[in-house]
């Protein structure tokens, strides 16, 4: 009997695929990559056409030895790694490491680990796609060159333990730019005004929001403006000026891509991107389902496409018709969003492999987190093939002299896809029953006004979900890179994560400033996005991968040489302080570590004494009068606190000023070239004096 060898990456897949194939098929795993660039050196021969030097990954020798034994016994070898560039590269590395040249070797790939998909792939084998391999090699080599050329510079300039990466440096800059926006933001005052109206014959009050005049919408910018409006409408009668009824349609969402799955799982399930990908991988590779054995529950999880196969489309429409009724099935072609013409579009969107495997039916076989993510994917997929939700809307304008108040309400006329799925950000729909019987003859009596002061808010700090969305919109990275990029900048402590928000740390700020100063193109968003387009060109067979490296390397080398020269002039020396080492009596110096600045004894290694470094900002504490110092949270986010902490609890995210607010007496804080009252309710703002700015 012929003997066939199928090699996959993951041991979890082995169990799932084995049961689909006959006894003459041996299924085994490579446990991911078997070869890579060496860790101890750059591993790229710059002098000889940028040829990478691949070595066997430490610990993979035994796996390769076992695979070689199986290869000798096999009549045919099928390389069945993941259906993307990384998977293609793993197959190529396996063929090189196992010396498969001259043997009957076939590349197979499947978008889902199901019996039909695996059998179909065996009937349609192909050769390794070297364009995809070269696209992965180009990315790996680019990242290696950037890391090995720039990291030693950061090490020398900011002191030990730092490193740079091509995509994460851009992600860090995006976060830093948002921090700058937030720090420079000046709040602007505005007011809202609600009229509480009594409708004849009704017990509940009708709440109408101030709109403006008959001709235009108005914003109330100050208390003076508010008082002027209140004075003008004090004795006015209230009447219904206009009623508009209409219909609003909300289209069904498209199925998940990697990016949208990560975003929605973050918002709805509070999952970090890395956790989402880990659990999705488990669902893809196979779960032991009671009565069915190991089953792959979802399609491949790294994709930019919202397309689904014809078979899956027919199956889900039949399921919707049977479960909800034919009127819920989307008509004709489903909206698939703006497809990007990139290599991952060869895949489908992320969907269940079998729509009849409902979350409820799978619940007993899944962990809590697996169930929650599977349910999210299943609901989104089913919703994508359902009719839009339809709402009846009512909009009423209420006249008070020349001014207008507005009331809007909507109610669901047909729930459509909402029978299955509502998005995390969807607002709660108003349903104001008082508008039902309202007409132009209705008698309205003003009971009271409700006026509130507000201030505009700065842009929000990035969350992991928001950062993924931005990276995707800017064309930076690919589905497989979002999670590791974010994990890397958090692990290196360039960014701190607190309550889902990402904050720049002191060390992250230093690294970002050096990268912007010495390597502007590396951290340039457009440059990085263009590099992704070139990598797509390699994958499509339109661009030679070494040409990209040849064009990139000289500019990087020149920038490194220039930075090395400038670095000698601006080299950060250990700054001597007046803090005396309590172990040996020397004056302690300021040093940089992976977590930022700290005080160390210059007598190292004889004296190893260290202390936290608290930089004074020259401002007395508003509570106790002692010095205000720069402190950091446990995760590395910078703030201003009292040197006498914890006895004195003063803290501020913005730098406090010595100046007091002339309006309310609170301390002021600095924002750009402005001083703001620390009491938001006061809202006082003034320009900083020229001498302060300088």
Image (tube, rainbow, N blue to C red):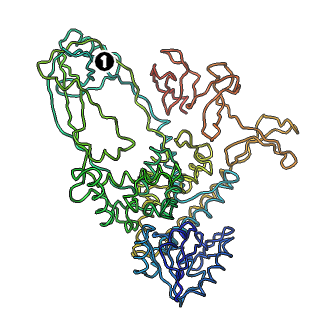
Total marks shown come to 1
In the image: residue 468, left or right of residue 608: left
Q: Please identify the quadrant where the C terminus is shown.
A: top right
Q: Give the residue pinned by disc 1.
A: 225
71 left or right of 585? Answer: left
Mark 1: which secondary structure? helix
Q: Residue furthest left?
A: 441
Q: Is residue 549 visible?
A: no
**Which residue is located at x 50 percent, y 80 percent?**
78
Q: Nearer the viewer, residue 26 or 361?
A: 361
75 over 253 or under it: above or below: below
Residue 565 horizontal/vertical position (percent): 64, 58
- Nearest to the observer: residue 610 or residue 303: 303
Q: Position of residue 661 (x, y in %)?
A: 51, 18
Q: Is residue 367 visible?
A: yes
**Point 64% across, 30% down: residue:** 617
Instruction: Give 212 or 560, whichever is nearer the viewer.
Output: 212
Instruction: Tell me where residue 637 appears, x and y as whole percent.
Output: 60, 39
- In the image, residue 325 sits, relative to residue 224, either above or below, namely below
Compared with 36, 257 (above or below) is above
- Image quarter for residue 478? bottom left
């Amino acid at each position: 009997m012929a003997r066939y060898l199928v090699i996959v990456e993951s041991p979890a897949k082995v169990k799932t695929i084995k049961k689909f194939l006959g006894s003459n098929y041996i299924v085994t795993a490579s446990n991911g990559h078997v070869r890579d660039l060496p860790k101890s050196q750059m591993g790229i021969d710059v002098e000889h056409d940028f040829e990478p030097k691949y070595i066997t990954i430490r610990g993979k020798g035994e796996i390769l030895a076992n695979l070689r034994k199986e290869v000798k016994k096999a009549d045919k070898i099928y390389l069945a790694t993941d259906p993307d560039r990384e998977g293609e590269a793993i197959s190529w590395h396996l063929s090189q490491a196992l010396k498969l040249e001259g043997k009957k070797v076939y590349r197979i790939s499947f978008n889902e680990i199901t019996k039909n998909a695996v059998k179909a792939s065996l009937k349609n084998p192909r050769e390794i796609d070297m364009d995809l391999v070269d696209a992965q090699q180009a990315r790996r080599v680019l990242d290696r060159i950037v890391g090995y050329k720039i990291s030693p510079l950061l090490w020398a300039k900011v002191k030990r333990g730092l490193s740079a990466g091509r995509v994460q440096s851009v992600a860090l800059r995006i976060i830093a730019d948002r921090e700058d926006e937030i720090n420079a933001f000046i709040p602007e005052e505005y007011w809202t005004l609600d009229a509480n109206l009594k409708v004849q014959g009704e017990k509940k009050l009708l709440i109408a929001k101030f709109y403006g005049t008959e001709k235009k919408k108005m914003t109330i910018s100050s208390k003076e403006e508010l008082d002027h409006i209140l004075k003008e409408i004090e004795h006015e009668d209230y009447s219904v000026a206009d009623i508009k009824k209409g219909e609003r349609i909300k289209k069904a969402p498209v199925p998940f891509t990697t990016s949208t799955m990560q975003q929605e799982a973050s918002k709805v399930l509070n999952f970090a991107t890395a956790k989402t990908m880990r659990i999705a991988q488990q669902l893809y590779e196979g779960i032991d389902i009671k009565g069915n054995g190991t089953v792959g529950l979802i399609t491949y999880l790294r994709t930019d496409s919202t397309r689904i196969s014809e078979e899956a489309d027919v199956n889900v429409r039949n399921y919707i018709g049977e479960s909800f009724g034919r009127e819920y099935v989307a008509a004709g072609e489903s909206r698939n969003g703006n497809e990007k013409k990139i290599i991952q579009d060869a895949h489908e969107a992320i969907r269940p492999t079998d729509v009849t495997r409902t979350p409820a039916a799978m619940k007993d076989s899944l962990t809590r987190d697996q169930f929650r993510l599977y349910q999210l994917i299943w609901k989104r997929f089913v919703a994508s093939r359902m009719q839009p939700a339809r709402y009846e809307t009512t909009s009423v304008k209420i006249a008070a002299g020349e001014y207008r108040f507005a009331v809007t309400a909507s109610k669901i006329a047909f729930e459509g896809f909402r029978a299955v799925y509502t998005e995390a950000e969807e607002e709660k729909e108003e349903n104001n029953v008082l508008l039902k019987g309202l007409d132009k003859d209705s008698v309205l009596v003003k009971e009271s006004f409700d006026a509130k002061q507000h201030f505009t808010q700065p842009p929000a700090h990035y969350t992991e979900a928001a950062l993924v969305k931005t990276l995707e919109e800017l064309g930076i990275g690919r589905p497989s890179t979002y999670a590791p990029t974010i994990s890397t900048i958090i692990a290196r402590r360039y960014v701190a994560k607190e309550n889902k928000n990402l904050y720049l740390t002191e060390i992250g700020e230093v690294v970002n400033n050096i990268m912007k100063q010495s390597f502007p193109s590396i951290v340039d968003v457009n440059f990085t996005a263009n590099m992704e387009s070139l990598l797509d060109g390699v994958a499509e067979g339109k661009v030679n991968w070494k040409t990209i490296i040849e064009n990139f390397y000289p500019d990087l080398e020149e920038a490194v040489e220039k930075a090395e020269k400038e670095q000698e002039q601006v080299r950060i020396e250990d700054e001597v302080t007046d803090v005396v080492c309590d172990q040996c009596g020397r004056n302690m110096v300021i040093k940089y570590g992976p977590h930022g600045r700290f005080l160390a004894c210059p007598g190292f290694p004889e004296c190893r004494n260290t202390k936290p470094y608290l930089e004074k900002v020259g401002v007395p504490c508003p509570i106790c009068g002692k010095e205000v110092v720069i402190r950091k949270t446990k995760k590395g986010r910078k703030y201003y606190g009292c040197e006498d902490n914890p006895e004195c609890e003063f803290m501020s995210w913005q730098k406090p000023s010595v100046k007091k607010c002339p309006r309310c007496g609170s301390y002021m804080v600095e924002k750009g070239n402005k001083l703001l009252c620390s009491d938001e309710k006061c809202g006082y703002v003034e320009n900083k004096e020229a001498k302060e700015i300088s």
